[in-house]
Image: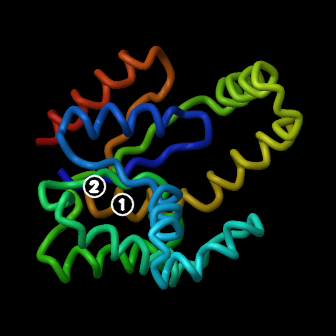
Amino acid sequence: MRLLIMGPPGAGKGTQSKRIAEHYGIPAISTGDAFRAEVQAETSLGRQVKPILDAGGYVDDELTNQIVAHRLEQPDVDPGFLLDGYPRTMPQVAALDQMLNDHGRALDAVLALEADLDELVARLTKRAEIEGRSDDSEEAIRIRQQKYIDETAPLLEGYAERGLLVTVNGLGTMDEVSERIFKALADRG
């Protein structure tokens, strides 16, 4: 299986990514983890990314694409992979398509976790209170949610047009959401 997982902040992507990877025996690849691995290995890409991450900045498309391409060349992705946090832009979608085409591969599905915005805001606000995160105000959470909607909608529309989009309700217990995911992917074939 070659999958992408997308969803708004608080929808449970990280939790479900681990479960999906384990279920299908494929690596879950987070771009953040890939960035950190390059930095830790002190590769030339890692040396370029480190100052950006240290400054709290965003890694540009070109560098992100190079790091994802490097990660997808590793032997553990031969049976498949689950990408979390990539692609985030239309140029990244095009780059991923090219990477896969170059290796005679294609995506099997793009999994989108959907959830009611107000419920996600409530979930994240509660988590912020429990963890003492003053930077996670309701207003800040709503801004991040809107940013996700604005930036991701075109990507989801594109994947839907290609027949790759699988949407799943991301609200419920971890087990309920996992069951929905596995059923939706099995129904897809």
Residue 159 numbered mark, or none:
1
Residue 164 numbered mark, or none:
2
Task: Pick whichever, 140 or 57, lies toward us.
Answer: 57
Residue 142: image location, x then y, percent: 78, 41
The CA span between labels 2 and 1 is 5 Å
Give the answer, above or below, for where 97 lies relative to 131.
below
Give the answer, above or below, for where 30 lies relative to 57.
above
Give the answer, above or below, for where 126 lies relative to 33.
above
Left or right: residue 110 compared with residue 74 = right
Q: Residue at x 46, y 14 (%)?
A: 173
Q: For residue 57, which quarter of the picture?
A: bottom right
Q: Residue at x 33, y 25 (%)?
A: 178
Circle nearer the N terminus (2, 1): 1
Q: Does dot 2 land on a helix, a strand or a loop?
A: loop
Q: Does dot 1 land on a helix, a strand or a loop?
A: helix
* Label 1 Cα crowd, 10 Å radius (few <14 / some 14-19 / many 20+): some
Residue 159: image location, x then y, percent: 36, 60
Residue 89: image location, x then y, percent: 53, 70
Amino acid beneath label 1? Tyr
Residue 148 numbered mark, or none:
none
Name the image quarter holding the C terminus. top left
* Label 2 Cα crowd, 10 Å radius (few <14 / some 14-19 / many 20+): some
Left or right: residue 8 compared with residue 92 = right
Give the answer, above or below, for where 175 lies relative to 36.
above
Task: Pick whichever, 111 or 72, lies toward us.
Answer: 72
Task: Pick whichever, 29 or 172, lies toward us.
Answer: 29
Q: Residue at x 27, y 40 (%)?
A: 21
Q: Residue at x 45, y 56 (%)?
A: 156
Residue 102: image location, x then y, percent: 19, 83
The reply to whether the C-beta atoms of the residues labelled 2 and 1 are less than 8 Å apart is: yes
Amino acid beneath label 2? Leu
